[in-house]
Every structure is written in C-alpha cells, then in structure tokens.
Amino acid sequence: IASLHVYSVLVVLFLTCGAVMATKDNDQIIKENNCETKMGLPCVLEAFTSIFETGSISTKCCGEVVVLGKVFHSALVKRTLENPLFIDLSPTTIIAKSIQTWNNCLALIDSPSPSA
C-alpha cells in the first residue's frame, strides 16, 4: 500500500511539473528554474508531503528548497493547486502549509548545525 501511495505521489508530481494548464507566470518561473533537474526527486516528495499531506521535510531537502528560492517555491505550489487532481484541496490551507514549510526550512538552514 505504501508503494502505491508513493507511486501516486510520483505520478502527481510529474503531472504537476508538466501541466500545461498553469498560468504563464507560474509556468515561466518553473521553466526558468528547471524544476525537473534542480531538485532531487526524494526532496520533491518530502516537500510535497509536507505541504499537501501530513509529513515533514529533512534539513537536506530544506536546503534544496531554500536554494531554489521563495518565488519558485510559491509558483510550484500555486501551479499544483491549479491541477484538477487537487480541486478538492483548500487553497488557503495549502498556501498556509506552504508558508509554514518555507519558514521551517529557513529556520533549519539558518540555525547552526549541532554537529558543527
């Protein structure tokens, strides 16, 4: 069952990255940032889970999110919400979770590592 869940998320992510129904602004931002190549798939899954489901994101993946930048992060979330697969989700809730994930990642990246 877990593998089916992961497979479903993968399908959704690839549909999201390639969706043609995105607004030109979000689509342009995502294309310019090479969404498919600049963030590893495990981190894409972690970020997706932390925003669209219930899950957490590791420090490593937070680093990838922060390097891509807030504009890219917001554009990808907004583009995902435009996908008909997510029509039942509350945009307000998702955007709030997106901001929370972004802020948590910034705090993780900005705080000194305990092993340092």
Image (cartoon, helix red, strand yellow):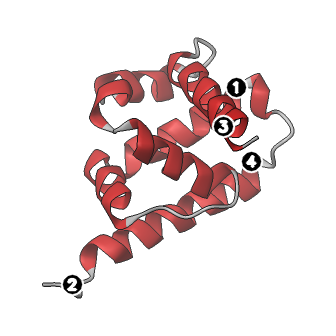
Between residue 39 and residue 103, name the one nearer to us.
39
| Mark 4 to mark 3 CA distance (whole Å) | 27 Å
Lower sequence index among marks 4 and 2 = 4
Lower sequence index among marks 2 and 3 = 3
Neighbour class for label 4 at 10 Å: few (<14), some, many (≥20)?
some
Lower sequence index among marks 4 and 1 = 1
**Residue, x 36% and y 77% (percent of image)?**
107
Q: Position of residue 13 (x, y in %)?
A: 57, 29
Give the residue type at disc 3.
Ser
Do the CB atoms of the residues marked 4 and 1 lie less than 8 Å apart?
no
Give the residue type at disc 2.
Pro
Of marks 4 and 1, the one in the foreground: 1
Is 62 above or below relative to 24?
below
| Mark 1 to mark 3 CA distance (whole Å) | 23 Å
| Mark 2 to mark 3 CA distance (whole Å) | 35 Å
Of marks 2 and 1, the one in the foreground: 2
Q: Position of residue 36 (x, y in %)?
A: 37, 25
The image's mark for residue 112 is 2
Relative to 70, 16 lies left or right: right
User: Would you name the residue on which mark 4 appears?
Assistant: 91
Indicate the secondary structure of the residue bearing disc 3: helix
**Residue, x 71% and y 33% (percent of image)?**
4
Neighbour class for label 3 at 10 Å: few (<14), some, many (≥20)?
few
Lower sequence index among marks 1 and 3 = 3
Give the residue type at disc 1.
Asn
Residue furthest left in the image: 116
Of marks 1 and 3, the one in the foreground: 3
Residue furthest bottom in the image: 114
User: Would you name the residue on which mark 1 appears?
Assistant: 83
Lower sequence index among marks 4 and 3 = 3
